[in-house]
Image (tube, rainbow, N blue to C red):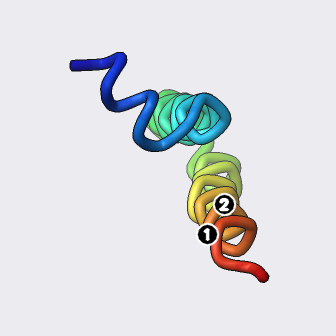
Amino acid sequence: MMKNFIERIGVMNCIMLLVVISIIIVSEVIFLKGNKLDAIFIAFWAPTILGFMNYLKYRN
């Protein structure tokens, strides 16, 4: 199942999705430690990376 998923979306996209998931987890940990502004700043990286992935996917 996982091999099928990786073949469908590509290795690089899988790596980028793992990076985005790790950014979200790190942001949550920082938020729960009390550094709310730092966590919000880091949390904005995830949609930025996803948007950049979409841009690269759909550009001609």
Name the secondary structure under disc 2: helix
- Front one among 35 and 50: 50
Q: How far apart, in angstroms, are the residues tagged by discs 2 and 1? A: 4 Å
Q: Residue at x 57, y 64 (%)?
A: 47
Count of numbered marks: 2
Q: Residue at label 2?
A: 53
Q: Quadrant of residue 56?
A: bottom right
Q: Residue at x 66, y 60 (%)?
A: 53
Q: Residue at label 1?
A: 54
- The image quadrant where one finds the N terminus is top left
Image position, residue 24 (x, y; %): 50, 40
Does 32 appear above or below 52? above
Q: Label 1 crowding class (10 Å Cα cut-off): few <14, some 14-19, many 20+?
A: few
- Residue type at mark 2 is Met
Q: Is residue 27 visible?
A: no
- The image quadrant where one finds the C terminus is bottom right
Name the secondary structure under disc 1: helix
Q: Residue at x 47, y 31 (%)?
A: 25
Is mark 2 in CB contact (under 8 Å) with mark 1?
yes
Left or right? Give the position of 60 relative to 24: right
Q: Residue furthest bottom?
A: 60
Image position, residue 37 (x, y; %): 65, 56
Q: Residue at x 59, y 60 (%)?
A: 50
Q: Quadrant of residue 26?
A: top right
Image position, residue 34 (x, y; %): 53, 38
- Residue type at mark 1 is Asn
